[in-house]
Image (cartoon, rainbow, N blue to C red):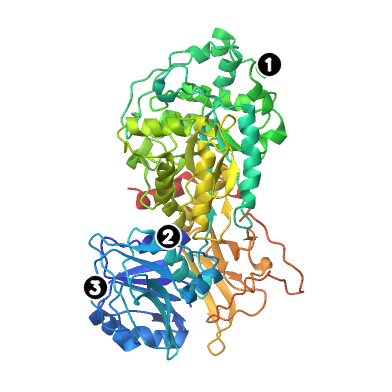
Amino acid sequence: MNMNTLYLTSNNDTSEVHYIFDSYGLNYERVQLPATSLKLEDGNNALYNAIVVEDATLDILQSLKGTIEAYQKKYKVRVVYLNCQPDTSLGFNTVDPNYEYSYVNLTNEGNALAKKLQLNGDKVTFAVPADGLFHYEVTFNNPSITPILKYNHTEAYAAAIVKQQDLESIHFFFESYNAILSYFVGHIWVPWVKYGLVDGYRRLFFSMQVDDFLISNPWDDTPGTEYRTSIKDMQNLAQWQNELVTRMPKGSQYKTELAFNGMYVLNTAKYKTHIANEDYGYVEQPDEYKLPLDDEGDHRYPVNPDATYDDTNWDDKILCEGDKLYEFFKNPVNQDNFYWLTHTFSHQNLDRASFHDVDMEIGLNIKLADDPYWGMYKRDCFSQKSIICPEISGLHNHQCLKAFEKNNVHYAVSDTSRRDLDAANPYFPVVTNQTFANYDGFVIIPRQPTAMWWDCSTPQQNLDLYKKRGGDKDMTWEKYVRYEIDHQVVNFIKMKHDPYMFHEGNLRNEDFEEITINGVKGKYGLLQEWVENMAVEIRKYFEWPLISLKMDDLVQYFILRLEKEQCKPIFTMVVDDSTFKVSEIKVSATQGSCTVPMFAVRDNGFDSSSVNSIEQYGEEPETAWIQVKQTPVSVKFNGDVKWNDDTYSGKTIRSQNGGDRSVSAAPMNFAKFGLLNSLLLCSVLLLIIF
């Protein structure tokens, strides 16, 4: 039986179901309804282990019924019905579509199913999308139907599980629209329809990146309002991070990532500031501006700065005496409280920067990060291969990207508010090619902007600037933060892996009054207030660990998804016809090779000798990572696993000899999986981006 989902849909425009599939990285095939025939088997091989039917009328359902139900009975396959017309033959009463705005809650049975999958949601009242969309308010009186979502204004139900005559199906009677409810229930029906054996993985990444670290930015270009982070700010932040993890689900890990500009150590120390005082003015370009192939770009750095100014030979003692924040972070213990990466030396815009200028910008920042200065460049806390470009500039500049590669920088972040940097699939990176930047193979991952603005260090500054720029004059800070959290939490429910953007001033906390957030008292800077509120909001929906990674490691998950798309893996379960026991799962690549995940919401975990690594944070179900080529790899389990028995107690997984298993918290040694071959990536890019 292939681990592949058949997606049958009548929807052409508004459905978000493909995002649910993509968030897990599932194999699926889409068939537009109505369909004249379905091929579900190839000889004795079942082609699909899950079926999803969306927006089907009773006539369409009737045309599919015989084929699908015969397949279900033979292979014990479950079916998901999304916003299909209620089928009276199953025991649902006839109802007309409803276009009114409504709300639903999980039933007791729905809560039990959610808890089994380590979901919460029991304290959430979910809005059912309206705005021209419809839903069904269904009633029934049948013991074979289990309600899982109920409308709170009527005795009708919004979702139910049906178990009748050896057939199992789950029904959601509302549209799969861009709404929290649609994405949340996806985390119920995806593992349910697959009996907990999922050809993908689930993970909540929780990465916060701080740009402009070491710079003292003025608020709203107002002289005298500059703020530069203090040592006490950073000590408080480190302590808060440790305390925060204790309030997050088991297995969570959190560190803030700092993107620094080294020139501002020289400025603060008032030492060798000649280059720092150069005029880095530039002519602003459109976001999509691409430096012409025959253009060298603009030259602002002297050709040989050491000969011109003796600028780049620094006395570390003078730097330590002149900048105590720099001195503080020479201590490896203090370094390890955070993740680090470069934001360039001077924060020069890179859209038209020359190769030499970018080489200087990266090289000088690396120099400051390395020995004999900070000495963190070669340490685990530092992302050598990643950069956050100033103003997200230079990503269409071939001279810039060449200089990045020279300095071993292969990855950057985008800004999801910029359409020119979007990938067609938000779970994939953009990989540059000649059309994009006159340069092949540079990897760009998406990053989300926040409403904690770059030049603000206090809530009042942020609120004043919001109102000055046309925002609601009656807005309070509490409402402002609430709106931001409500707006952003959907990205986590969609399981997007994107990091989030903050800036230097957002770290300020030393001189703040203590406030209480969700019952916890503390001095909270703008970043801390955002993170505290978001962590609580996410936990309303998930009991999954929140994981922050340094950027070099986070990028690998995006690259693995892209490699998986290219190699098109096939997962085939070998299932006994009579007992339905799974003896093995064969995994192979259609072309090339890749590393693919699979997770199991089962008490019997993976046999570690049959996979490359096992990833598990806290009490999460195991995720196996398997390196595959065109020759099948056999993945096995510890103990018997029955295909159509998804019993899961969530107890500690034990090995065959009865001892506790030790599982890793990393999918693989990332060193084995460096930058993808540029030609391979570009061939994928043609399919994904353009």
Q: CA separation, marks 1 and 2? A: 52 Å
- Amino acid carrying mark 3 in the image: Pro
> Which residue occupies 37% across, 20% down?
282
Mark 1 or 3: the one toward you: 3
Evaluate whether residue 549 shows in this view. no
**Mark 2 to mark 3: distance in Å?**
29 Å
Work out which residue is located at the far top of the displayed protein and give it: 308
Amino acid type at image mark 1: Glu
Q: Position of 139 compared to 162: left or right?
A: left
Picture quadrant where residue 299 is located: top left
Residue ID for mark 2: 22
Q: Quadrant of residue 42?
A: bottom left
Relative placement, left or right, of 526 versus 604 is left
Q: Please state the horizontal and vertical placement of residue 662, each as a whole percent of the image.
A: 72, 62
What kind of element bears circle 3? loop
Choose mark 1 or mark 2, whichever is in front.
1
Task: Specify the label residue 97 is tagged with.
Answer: 3
